[in-house]
Amino acid sequence: MTMQFQKKDPRATITTKFGEIAIRFYPDEAPRHVENFVKLAKMGFFDGTTFHRIVPGFLIQGGDPYSKLPDRTLHGTGGPGYFLQPEPNDRPHKRGAVSMAKMPRESNSTRDFNDNGSQFFICVGENSGLDRRYTVFGEVFRGLDVIDKIVAAARDQADNPLEPIAMTIRVKE
């Protein structure tokens, strides 16, 4: 990736049926992750994907292209076709932190986890056990009430919302 940020304060807005979530990024702490997220958002990659995993007190997760498909067993298994090297930093996994989900490099691997190229999560509570193990690359600065509405949605045994919660993401230029 060769994109370079011209501004110090990149931002994005996630729009859902529950309202908007505004995110500011940390390009100094996680430059590759911010660059990747912004690139995918500008391409429209996230549009129509859903928050496919909601865990009260923990997180809401989205960004999987397979979440557009009706087969719910595939939700949470996809990405853009590449992984990112983790960029662990000292940003805490506090309420509103935006971080990348991890995926094994090989489908049968339980070790050597890398960051998924598109799946991300937003913490709905304090999750210090994730600190320095997952890449925090942004934080919600407006819309915490929206993440509370999302995490309160009815869900199945796999933590997938019973009614899809689709998103679109726009980057502020």
Image (cartoon, rainbow, N blue to C red):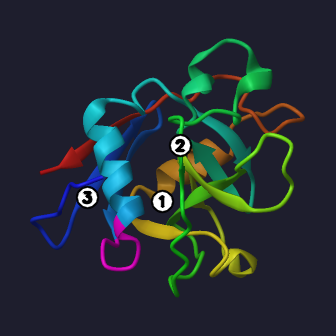
Q: Which mark is residue 11?
A: 3
Q: Identify the residue position indicated by label 2 in the image.
A: 82
For image coordinates 70% across by 45% down, the residue present is: 54
Q: Earlier in the sequence, mark 2 or mark 3?
A: 3
Residue sitting farthest toward the top:
70
Q: For the residue marked with disc 3, what is the amino acid?
A: Arg
Q: Earlier in the sequence, mark 1 or mark 2?
A: 2
Q: For the residue marked with disc 2, what is the amino acid?
A: Tyr
Helix, strand or loop for the magenta stretch, by majority: loop
Q: Is residue 44 left or right of residue 118?
A: left
Q: Which mark is residue 144?
A: 1
Residue 64 appearing in the image: yes
Provide the residue span drawn in magenta: 26-31
For image coordinates 38% across by 50% down, the residue present is: 37
> Is 69 colored magenta in this rendering?
no
Q: Earlier in the sequence, mark 1 or mark 3?
A: 3
Q: For the residue marked with disc 1, what is the amino acid?
A: Leu
State the image coordinates of residue 24 (x, y, percent, origin top left). 31, 65
Would you place residue 147 above or below residue 29 in this image? above
State the image coordinates of residue 31 (x, y, percent, origin top left). 34, 69
> Is 30 colored magenta in this rendering?
yes
Label 2: few (<14), some (14–19) or many (≥20) C-alpha neighbours in 10 Å? few
The CA distance from mark 1 to mark 2 is: 30 Å
State the image coordinates of residue 163 (x, y, percent, origin top left). 66, 22
The CA distance from mark 2 to mark 3 is: 23 Å
